[in-house]
Image (cartoon, rainbow, N blue to C red):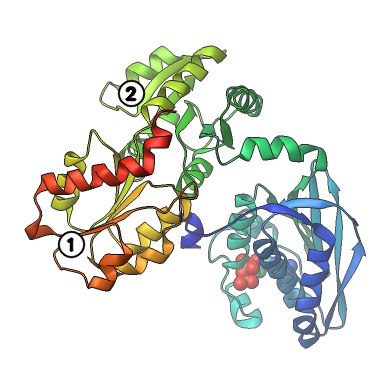
Amino acid sequence: MEKIESGKIDISPQPIEIMPLVEQTLEANSSYGEQLRVRFALSQALPGVMVLADNGRLMQVLTNLLSNAAKFSPADDVVSVSVKRSGESVRVAVSDHGPGIPEEFRGRIFEKFSQADSSDARQKGGSGLGLSISKALIERMGGSIGFESQPGKGATFYVDIPEWQEQRTAEHRRKRDPRRPRVLICENDHAMAGYLSALLDEGGFSSDIALDAVHAKWLLNNGHYVAMTLDSILPDQSGLSLARELYLKKHTHSLPIVVVSDCADQARESLGGDMHSVVDWLGKPVDGNRLLAAVRRIVQQNQLPRILHIEDNQDTASMVRELLSDLADVTVSVDMEDAKFRLARETFDLVILDLLLPDGFGTDILTHIKDVRSRPVPVVIYSVYPVSEEMARRVAAAFVKSETSPDQLRETICLFLDSACLVDIKV
Ligand code: ADP
């Protein structure tokens, strides 16, 4: 649950056919059902229909619904599963004839550690986490979860998963093209979000939409964005407090934000002038040209090559950042975990590596560094200790801190950055 909430869980929605997935999940759970003398039966199917979902995570969610239904069913009963369309989604519903959900418990059912009756855990087993995890997972896939129940007559739990339609494929591909700079649209108003997305698409950007602050933070944790447009009014947090929160976080400190607000001038005043990440303010209705100009300006400024500095010593990290400030945009990871997390999601032109890190040995990261634009990413070791000759051959350069002047380090990095980035800088 913590991993989902902090965004440290991989969820990659892809087009998949729904029926084989449902059938496979029923099959995988049938022996659990047999143990409880409950049979799972498919009552309605939707052959050939595709959804946009993460295969493994969706199976995990359905497994949870099936096991709950089986746990609460009377012996020798049937749990029925139906798959049908519901608006633009596909609904998979799991129905049982158990005790149902008591009225007073309904508001809490998706909360963590919640069980209708504290004796449930002892009678039926479980932690009260299954449904809250299911809810988090399905929402991260852009779907939703819900239930209907008549106490005493059973319960139907369902998930709605966005349907994948072939005609949307070309547009989707273009919008997701990894070569396009990606902008996060954080916007409460669906129609406005759609408009901004179409505008950015025409301007050559790809975009993702977050309808609230929680979703925006999750997306920011999981992907790299060149900029963000921010509605000043969001359902779960004010846009300005979100901007401030992002500014105070290491990972999003320098994310450029364009605030889109009904009352831009007022919002601007209330934020004050100290937040350098807010680069523009646009009133509604949005002037499309001005928005595109603002985002283009940001992207041009961001053409500096990116360096990941994996270093737990703050003084060294600040010294290096200062030393290279005009050459590169330096991001610091203080441990291996953070470094791996970033390397999996972001693109860097060069990596500077310390050897002794709180959670491991720096060189173990080498296998996580993927080539960028089909060229290997140069790695420069900068550490208190010397490295073996074999290791020195595997990296672009290896420096011992006490034996290296800042100028030497800068010169070498400059050299490797030049060969790594020259082609791209002129964009
Ligand atoms: P657990 O691990 O306890 O099953 P869940 O989050 O999956 O955790 O479920 C939380 C609680 O919701 C259960 O303990 C039970 O009180 C109630 N519940 C879930 N599914 C059903 C169902 N099909 N019928 C009746 N009660 C249910």
Q: Position of residue 44 (x, y in %)?
A: 92, 60
Residue behind mark 2: 271
Earlier-in-chain disc, 2 versus 1: 2
Q: Contact (CB < 8 A) between labels 2 and 1?
A: no
The three-letter amino acid code for the residue at tag 2 is: Leu
Residue 362 visible in the snapshot? no
Name the residue rendered at 58%, 60% in the picture.
Answer: 132
Question: Dot 2: what SS?
Answer: helix
Name the residue rendered at 43%, 47% in the picture.
Answer: 347
Is 209 situated above or below 293?
A: below
Q: Position of residue 263 (x, y in %)?
A: 46, 14
Q: Position of residue 216 (x, y in %)?
A: 50, 40
* Ligand 1 positioned in quadrant: bottom right
Residue 383 image label? 1
Quadrant location, the C terminus: top left
Question: Dot 1: what SS?
Answer: strand
